[in-house]
Amino acid sequence: MKKFLNCILIRKIEVEYFKLDFELIGGIFMSEIVVKVTRGSLVESIHRADIAVVNSKGNLVYSLGDSHKVAYMRSAAKPIQTMEVILSGASERFSFTDKELSIMCGSHYGEEFHRETVEKILNKIGLNVNNLLCGSTLSLSREYSQKLLWEHAKLNPTYTDCSGKHAGILSVCVLKGYNIENYNSPEHPVQKEIKTIVSEICSIKEKNIVMGTDGCTVPVFGMPLYNMALGYSKIASGYGLSESYKKAADRIFSAVNNAPEMVAGTNGFCTEIIKNTHNKIIGKFGAEGIYCIGVRGADFGIAIKIEDGGTRAIWPTVVKCLEDLNVLDDREKDILSRYKNGKNLNNVGEKVGNIFPDFTLKKNF
């Protein structure tokens, strides 16, 4: 009986110990509040996030929450995926312009000039809209979606935000003679080559990349925020890359800065932040609350994951990060302030509260 009671006591101690250990770990790595939403005098909602700021040498210089949280890059991976178009020789072979490369990196709004650009890519490689496997969706822009619905637009895959990326992938397939019927399969050679590039740029072994399927049907890559941020720092700086990779990264950075309207669209955040920061930023949104940024000259990349996947918390968080890191000058802060401090509106457009960031990045040095 005494032995039995001793076993129970030991087991109770073990349970309490591991419970304490779990709580401590959870406290250390818990996502932190980044954005608050008020209605009247109350804070009605909050959004939490995890953030990693990494320099090109691999040092975690700032963070918030869990800087190693594993998440899918989603569309934030597009600038890295598009490097295959350059490394393969497809960009040179088909004489792709900055606009065409930029839309391959973008999640565009499907506006007329976007659709025309995707069609030009397809014409250059001898294919057509029927070869795109991204599906047909309404615009990411609420305003433009309403316009399309009002006009009873007949959608096709060029309207879809990922059609530029798909056209770019197809250009590699045409150049190399790959099958174009299943280019979205993880086992397709073009997807294996893209995965290798992602692995190299983000300094993560291929076997450690968590694979999934994106909304547009192609593979998507899961990894720690740390590695996403490191990848974007390399795109911006070229540090530690081979000569061919460095040239490809530089071409990508230049293309999106020369044609930012292709990365999102009219009044789109990605477009506005690139357009108004004087060739020093590449920034890309990803679904479910992902945003990645590379800053040229400052030698770091940023990766953000909004815990609940909410889009409305991304823009304030991004702008506040750039302010904390002294990336923006006064004019840039002024232009981007509308994305940092938003209005909570009712159904008739009256302001009933605010949407604003409430955090400070933590130094890790």
Image (cartoon, rainbow, N blue to C red):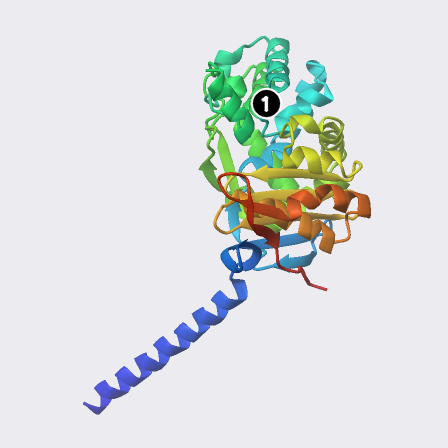
Q: Is residue 241 left or right of residue 68?
A: right
Residue 185, image x and y in percent? 46, 27
* Residue occupying the point 63% across, 59% down: 359
Secondary structure beneath disc 1? helix
Above-or-below relation of 136 to 4: above
Most foreground residue, 11 or 309:
309
Answer few, some or many: residues within 10 Å of disc 1's Cα (few below 14, many 20 plus, some between 14 and 19): many
Locate the C terminus by quadrant. bottom right
Above-or-below relation of 213 to 116: below
Residue 188, image x and y in percent? 49, 25
Query: Which residue does the numbered mark 1 point to in the structure image?
Result: 164
Most foreground residue, 336 or 94:
336
Residue 118 visible: yes
* Residue occupying the point 32% across, 83% down: 10
Dot 1 amino acid type = Gly
Q: Is residue 40 left or right of residue 360?
A: left
| Residue placed furthest toward the bottom | 2
Residue 264, image x and y in percent? 62, 30
Residue 295, image x and y in percent? 74, 44
* Residue occupying the point 45% across, 70% down: 23
Most foreground residue, 174 or 284:
284
Locate the N terminus by quadrant. bottom left
* Residue occupying the point 73% across, 27% down: 255
